[in-house]
Amino acid sequence: MSRAGSIANSVIIPRLTEVFGVVTATWISTAVGLMLSSSCATAIIIMDTAVSEKSKLVLNYKDTLRRLPHVFWLLSVICVSTYGCLGPFNNSAQRFLASRYYKGDQSAAGLAVRFYYLLFSVKQADLT
């Protein structure tokens, strides 16, 4: 599912940049990401509260987070670091492709970059 978001980002951001400019397109994409993340977190909290009310359990989120093993936190840092590096690299690759092969057309380069995400998602599905 995260790959679908990356594909959408590669296609939509250049179009937003053409219409609104780089700064506004960045803020729009940030706001969309925050809204989706917040709504998912809210849904999880609501479902968790409903389950805890049925089973009469008292949940303490801080204790729950402390009980997670160190491997979880290490993998979390690796994932965040990877996406923090991979996303900007792919956006730079998109600009490079646009200037070198697509005569400055960011939308066409975004369509080309999406194949990387599609191939990676298929390979990732094979691993699971």
Image: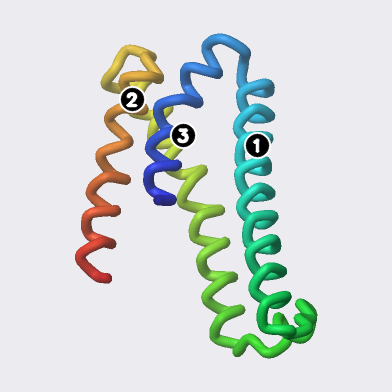
Name the residue: 26% across, 45% down: 118
Q: Nearer the viewer, mark 2 or mark 1?
A: 1
Residues under numbered marks 3 and 1 in contact, where contact means CB atoms less than 8 Å apart:
no
Q: Residues within 10 Å of mark 1 (few under 14, many from 20)?
A: few
Question: How are the residues colored?
Answer: rainbow
* Location of residue 122 (image quadrant): bottom left
- Badge 2 or badge 3: first in the primary sequence: 3
Compared with 127, 117 (above or below) is above
Residue for badge 1: 30
x and y percent of residue 9 in the render? Answer: 46, 34
Compared with 60, 19 (above or below) is above
x and y percent of residue 43 in the render? Answer: 64, 55
Amino acid type at image mark 1 = Thr
SS type, badge 1: helix
In front here: 17 or 4?
Answer: 4
- Badge 3 or badge 1: first in the primary sequence: 3
Residue for badge 3: 9
Amino acid type at image mark 3 = Asn
SS type, badge 3: helix
In front here: 66 or 52?
Answer: 52
